[in-house]
Amino acid sequence: MNTHNERITELVERMKQDNPEVVALFLDRKLDDAALVAHLREHFSAVMQQHYPKAWAYYTGEEQTEQDYYKLMSTSMAHLRMMDYLDHEGEAFEDGNLHGRKVVSQPITLLRKVLLGKDCSCSVDFVEDMAHLLAQLSGVEDRDIPPRSKVLEWMERHPSGLDQPVIAWRAKNKERIIELLVERIENQINAGSFYHFKQRMTEIEKRKQVLLWWKEDRFHLHFAIRTADDLNRYLDYSMDEKTLGIMHEAEQKGIPIFATPYFLSLIDTRPLEQQERAHSDEAIRSYLFYSRDLVEEFGSIVAWEKEDIAKPGEPNAAGWLLPSHNVHRRYPNVAIFIPDTMGRACGGLCSYCQRMYDFQGGRFNFELEKLRPKKSWKEQLELNMEYFRNDPYLWDILITGGDAFMSSVKSLKTILDAVLTMAAQKIEDNKARSLEEQYAPMRRVRLGTKIPVYLPQRVTTELAQVLADFKKKAAMVGIDQCVVQTHVSSAMEVTPETKKAVRRLLDAGWAVTNQEVFTVAASRRGHSAKLRKVLNDIGVLPYYNFSVKGFKENRELFSSNARSTQEQVEESSIGQIAQRYHATIRTFMKDAQNMVEQIDSIRQGDEIPFISPDRNTLNLPGVGKSNTYRTIGITEDGRRILRFEFDHTRPHSKVIEDMGFVIVIESKSIARYLDQLSEMGENVSDYDTIWGYSAGSLEPRSPVFEGTTK
């Protein structure tokens, strides 16, 4: 007997022991499959109405608020899922992971075949998920919320880039990389390069010169690594044969490789057995190294966020008419602005990048000189600002890319000046309108960047001064929130250089918020909690905790939505901000210079390790962000099928309101996800409750981000 069959046999025996009553219904040969579904629906409807009325009300939609969600415990949530499975038994869904091929959810039919010992195309992962469901239905498996002490213990497993041992081994990395850079500069063909050694410089003098250049962002961009072989060389030939092979294939297929010397110094190149905390840099490695899935899919990747596909004069998926490719929009009150500047590049390319679709099409790249603004950009900028000026709803602009801080300081200043002009014009225009006809004035400006992680040297005093000047002028035209949004996914990314960059941004009067990307490595127990603490320490407010989106190209990095919900309920919750502070925290964004002290006042007042104003969520195709979902089906290979509702706490376009929900088929099973955690040295028993999280509810937006803006 092969391992596959042995494991299924074990699971069948477990189901018979855990839930003999329900298994008996599946084994009743007097019922055909359709009759079994009808009988099960009648059975579970009666059980829910009698024993789990709160779950029944949630199922029927009578009581579906966030408060109602938190009343659902493991057994009642299992009954909710079983009813949803029964309602959608035999239904076909388009699977984006399979390029739109239809897959059928038939958990009842497949499980019956397994229990009867018939041939079945289903995988062990499917059977394991169903075995947990039956155990939850009978109450054999219950949800034990870990105590705060356990969460603190998990947090301690994860070091920070501010820890002295980490700083020490990274200093050695830096020394080794500097030696390689000295050699590279000595051997460069273009002697006219800005970065060259003067004649008769000694080796010590050359090293000192490179150490000085190391502080310059242009130096790191100039000497960024762009090939797989150079990447391996700068990582001290520590890449294993499989990873190096995949990176070679990626290079040949046209996926850019771009890594600065600074960022490479953060990677632990020592063998695992020599590391103080094995796999501690795994989340950082997740950015850098591509998966075979990504290489295979590159060239046929489709845009996950359908509303980002826009043609001038035609409505996008959310129903908005847009002026150009520079503006992306999902919501009435906010639009993304992507300038035609060097901001279309980044300080590095994350393997899970939401703009991989644009890199695939060549719209984004790392040919930095070619990305400099063209003469026509001035007119294009004015056209885009007119769009914001003449829209009655827009009051929030998110300038991103690429990366907003990859634009030159001059270009960024030009853009910010244009925003100021537009905001002033919007106010002036309103003077000619009646009270009922008033357009929303601009209230919030955000800059999206990962520079504090990839290249903190780019946050110069010159850049900070431009931001400080804008902040002062912004207040005079009604803009009361200036925010830098970062993407830090690991406490190991927070280095002394990052801390210094963040301090400059805060001193310029800009609040700094963070959007973590919840990869497999970042989803480990205590990892996000530790990140929140370290970010709090340097004055950064956690804003979003994003599940990895995308289809098969991101499968390797995808962490199940069940794990995201588990983290929200069991770990993030120990940093919940008490309601008595809600009025106080509304002022935090306006007083960015004192953010560290403001955060500490709450942490110390409530004796909590961190504050967690962030929301665990997913960017959905077409409808924006949400984490309100139910598991309505499952594929034969164990991938859950989720139905997401949109975020009802914020306004949407009529198109989205009519759409109602979005179906997402996950790219991997929970069993496969847990296998990956095991490969990273995790004890998977720490995650036992994950199987019960089959529904989620998006947390309300924290008052700290509302401020006085309404």
Image (cartoon, rainbow, N blue to C red):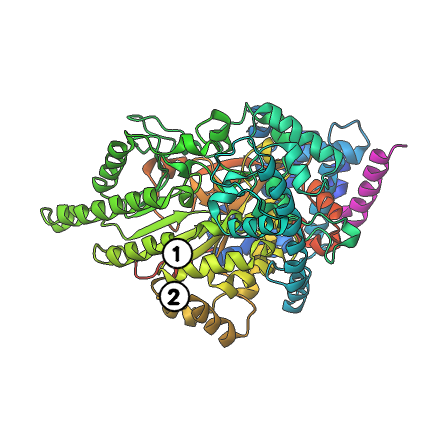
| Side of 276 relative to 264 (left or right) | right
Say which of marks 1 and 2 sits in front.
Answer: 1
Q: Residues within 10 Å of mark 2 (few under 14, many from 20)?
A: many
Residue type for callout 2: Gln
In this picture, is 207 found above or below 358?
below
Considering depth in this image, is 175 or 263 the residue closer to the camera? 175
625 with respect to 286 (left or right): left
Query: Which residue has dot 2 on it?
Result: 593
**Furthest residue in direction right, as rendered:** 1
Q: Measured from the top left, where is residue 167 in percent x and y?
A: 63, 59
- Verify whether residue 15 appears in magenta: yes
Residue 567 visible? The answer is yes
Q: State the mark number for residue 461.
A: 1
Position in image of residue 96 (x %, y %): 55, 29
Q: Quadrant of the N terminus?
A: top right
**Contact (Cβ within 8 Å) of mark 1 with mark 2:** no
Q: Tell me the kind of residue under disc 1.
A: Thr
Of the numbered discs 1 and 2, the one sitting upstream in the chain is 1
Q: In which quarter of the image is residue 83?
A: top right
Q: Left or right: where does residue 183 sit relative to residue 360?
A: right
- Residue 52 placed where, x, y %? 59, 55
Q: Give the range drawn in magenta.
A: 1-21
Res 683 → quadrant:
bottom right
Q: Which of 591 and 119 is in front in this view?
A: 591
